């Protein structure tokens, strides 16, 4: 028995063959990671380092883990969501020498045990999603010695960065973290085009219902919300946006969408998608005026955006009518349907973002991790932006893989832009 298998907590190692096929498929469509893999195999930037990665464990994240391993690291991975884990991919990772703690559909207690087991691995650096590793570390006084040994890490999501910045603001953050989500090559493409496509992919494959001619209510108009609204419009839906930010509301209107409060939008919606990173975005007041048959789903990190307590309180009965679809029957006979338990619909009920989109994000993750490992000891414990040159390097790599060239400024043009006198 291999060391990775001996130390892992997984469903079944015999599932590995289909997991290998999934990983090999995405590898063919992630040219940026392939380029970095060649570099990392040559440079071994993580040689002698232990790296813990907490992400949605499917094929694309698996390939990122294998890239980090190719850079010389001893890698352990755990899940950032109980429903997004693909057990065959996890088994394949273990066969390829990565220790894993993840089982699809595990309980919350088991999920937290997996995170703690991954931290017991003793990381020198981390890649986090939703701040799960960081918040677990900082909330446990027994982890103080472990935190002292962590050089730093990278954070994947908007939600995670909010948690990190809250820690940083309190002066409690114990090591530097790179806000990968705030990089241009992350939120402009992953959040917008990745979320937009994968959310509707998850909704359509789960419900097998048409989108055209229906009304989609998008709760939140950040970059993820923009992508969800844009794709809904492209599929032929009428789009209503709800917002708390007047600037984003104006933007939504000028992008061709309607804007109204959630309680008003609730009367019209056939599909509801929350994309805010906050809690209680759809609650009792909205449920009470929804149409019979309304479909609810969440594309924010945690399953708190749609109030499940309110749904249960209003319901006389709950049943699973199709895989990943719960039917809530209200006292007046209306029914609403919640997808994937209110968890991330694109991952809990789908395969997540397209490989080509995640190729850019995970290139930033890998390069950010290298930067933090090399420079982290010289950094104070704060949240750091991705260096601009790294962002542009990834964009240039993307263009190269497409065979696309762009212009460069001449010396005269640079002088002109830099001069106030002209």
Image (cartoon, rainbow, N blue to C red):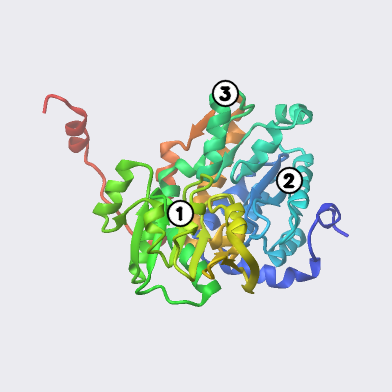
Would residue 223 appear left or right of 421 to someone viewing this image? right
Q: Nearer the viewer, residue 60 or 39?
A: 60
Q: Is residue 228 visible?
A: no
The residue positioned 51% from the left and 65% from the top of the image is 29
Front: mark 3 or 2: 3
- Image x and y of residue 68, in percent: 64, 49
Residue 31 tag number: none
Distance CA(mark 1)–CA(mark 2) = 25 Å
Task: Determine which residue is flagged by label 1.
Answer: 190
Residue at mark 3: 170
319 vs 179: above or below: below
Q: Secondary structure at mark 2?
A: helix
| Label 1 to label 3: alpha-carbon separation | 30 Å
For label 1, the SS is helix
Residue 281 visible to the viewer: yes
Q: Quadrant of the C terminus?
A: top left
* Disc on the earlier residue, 3 or 2: 2
């Amino acid at each position: 028995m291999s060391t990775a298998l001996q130390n892992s907590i997984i469903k079944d190692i015999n599932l590995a063959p289909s997991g290998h096929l999934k990983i090999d498929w995405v590898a063919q469509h992630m040219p940026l990671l392939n380029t970095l893999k060649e570099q990392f195999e040559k440079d071994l930037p993580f040689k002698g380092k232990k790296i813990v990665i907490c992400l949605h464990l499917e094929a694309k994240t698996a390939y990122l883990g294998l890239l980090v391993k190719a850079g010389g690291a001893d890698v352990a991975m755990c899940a950032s969501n109980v429903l997004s884990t693909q057990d065959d991919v996890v088994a394949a990772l273990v066969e390829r020498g990565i220790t894993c703690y993840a089982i699809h559909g595990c309980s919350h207690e088991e999920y937290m045990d997996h995170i703690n087991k991954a931290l017991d691995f003793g990381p020198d650096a981390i890649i986090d999603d939703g701040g799960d590793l960081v918040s677990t570390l900082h909330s446990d006084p027994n982890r103080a010695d472990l935190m002292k040994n962590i050089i730093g890490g990278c954070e994947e999501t908007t939600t995670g960065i909010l948690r990190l910045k809250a820690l940083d603001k309190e002066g409690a953050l114990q090591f530097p973290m790179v806000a990968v989500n705030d990089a241009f090559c992350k939120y402009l493409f992953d959040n917008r085009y990745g979320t937009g496509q994968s959310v509707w992919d998850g909704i359509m494959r789960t419900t097998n219902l048409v989108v055209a001619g229906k009304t989609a209510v998008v709760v939140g108009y950040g970059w993820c919300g923009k992508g969800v609204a844009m794709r809904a419009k492209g599929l032929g839906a009428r789009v209503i946006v709800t917002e708390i930010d007047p600037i984003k509301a104006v933007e939504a209107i000028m992008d061709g969408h309607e804007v109204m409060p959630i309680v008003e939008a609730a009367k019209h919606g056939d599909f509801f998608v929350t994309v805010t990173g906050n809690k209680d975005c759809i609650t009792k007041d909205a449920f009470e005026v929804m149409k019979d048959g309304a479909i609810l789903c969440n594309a924010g990190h945690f399953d708190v955006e749609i109030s499940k307590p309110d749904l249960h309180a209003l319901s006389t009965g709950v049943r699973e009518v199709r895989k990943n679809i719960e039917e809530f029957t209200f006292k007046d006979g209306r029914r609403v349907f919640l997808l994937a338990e209110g968890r991330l619909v694109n991952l809990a009920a789908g395969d997540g973002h397209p490989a080509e989109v995640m190729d850019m994000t995970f290139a930033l993750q890998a390069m950010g991790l290298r930067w933090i490992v090399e420079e982290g000891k010289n950094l104070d414990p704060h949240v750091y932006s991705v260096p601009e040159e790294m962002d542009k390097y990834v964009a240039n790599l993307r263009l190269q893989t497409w065979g696309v060239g762009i212009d460069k400024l001449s010396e005269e043009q640079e002088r002109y832009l830099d001069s106030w006198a002209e």
